[in-house]
Amino acid sequence: MNNNFLQPFLHKGKALFLAYDHGFEHGPKDLTGKSIDPEYILDLAVKGGYTGIILQKGIAEKYYTDTKYQKTIPLILKINGKTNIPQTADPYSSINCSVDYAKRLGAKAVGYTIYLGSKHEEKMFYDFGKIQEQAHKLKMASIAWIYPRGSAVEDEFSPEMTVYAARVGLELGADMIKIKYCGSEETFKKAVQAAGKTKIILSGGPEVEDEEILKTIESVIKAGAIGIAVGRNIFQDQNPLAITEKIKGVVFD
Ligand code: FBP
């Protein structure tokens, strides 16, 4: 069963998402300068021509739903989350919002993180199974963040684990999988192949020099990824709109 639930998020067949769940996942220390203000981020997403914005429920309720932003940029509601306060070897990210409520907030997709290899992976597979079915029932896309992580995972960025993550995403029925970079165009291509008809996007990562993130993005696009979800490399940059334009050049052109 093929669907076109990703269509609202694509421009020239590509996706460029601004991720903004870091206040929850990493703490407000990530939200440097003006980025502590959700309205600043939503304005940036619209001005920058992002094809989607990723928010948690509370920010969507207070800053997105029934506002001008709802008309201008599609929402991916992240429906699970965890903080980085407990130093847990085997992470689990719990659901804090239903797919139905995400729809009521105006989301056209839901996002859910799976820690592949965690001792709790089976709970996340179970959750995602329910989420994917409900999302499709409501004509929404299901996007899986799949990060190999846990006491059984030696190297969460290894090509082998990344390719495995991509394949699990396909087999779970995700419409799109967000994975981390595994070091080269060649290895990332294997992940794209393993994902088959499921679309792959890159997960941005910690802030690095502009040239480095641009090179990484170029490499994943050449490997067949359809885009990127990026946060820190934008809102922690000295000039978020300028780096956005450069990224757009790589992703869309
Ligand atoms: P970045 O581009 O800043 O890496 O954001 C992508 C993202 O997936 C966010 O949605 C999330 O908050 C963060 O990375 C989680 O990263 P990690 O679990 O590696 O700390």
Image (cartoon, rainbow, N blue to C red):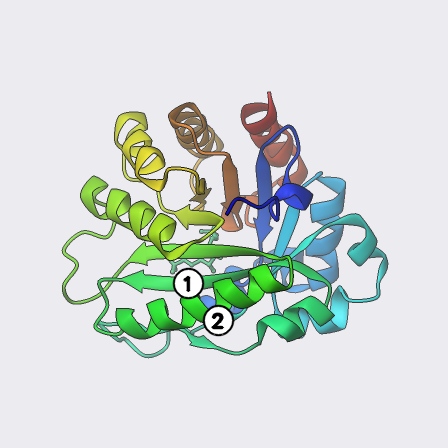
Within 8 Å of ligand 1, the CB of disc 1? yes
Which circle's residue, 2 or 1, is located before the other in the chain?
2
Structural crowding at the residue carrying mark 2, measured as other residues with C-alpha within 10 Å and reported as few (<14), some (14–19) or many (≥20): many
Disc 1 element? strand
5 relative to 127, above or below = above
Q: Can residue 51 be seen in this view?
A: no
Q: Where is residue 179 in the image (x, y as percent from the top left)?
A: 38, 47
Residue in the image at 18% along x and 51% along y:
155
Dot 1 corresponds to which residue? 113
Q: In this view, does 26 lie to the left or right of 97?
A: left
When the figure is inspected, residue 115 is found, relative to residue 179, above or below; the finding is below
Q: Quadrant of residue 38?
A: bottom right
Q: Position of residue 18 (x, y in %)?
A: 60, 49
Q: Nearer the viewer, residue 2 or 11?
A: 2
| Amino acid type, mark 1 | Thr
Identity, as a three-letter code, of the amino acid under mark 2 = Asn
Q: Tag on residue 80?
A: 2
Residue visible at 36% across and 55% down in the picture:
146
Quadrant of ligand 1: it is bottom left
| Residue at 51% over, 36% down | 227
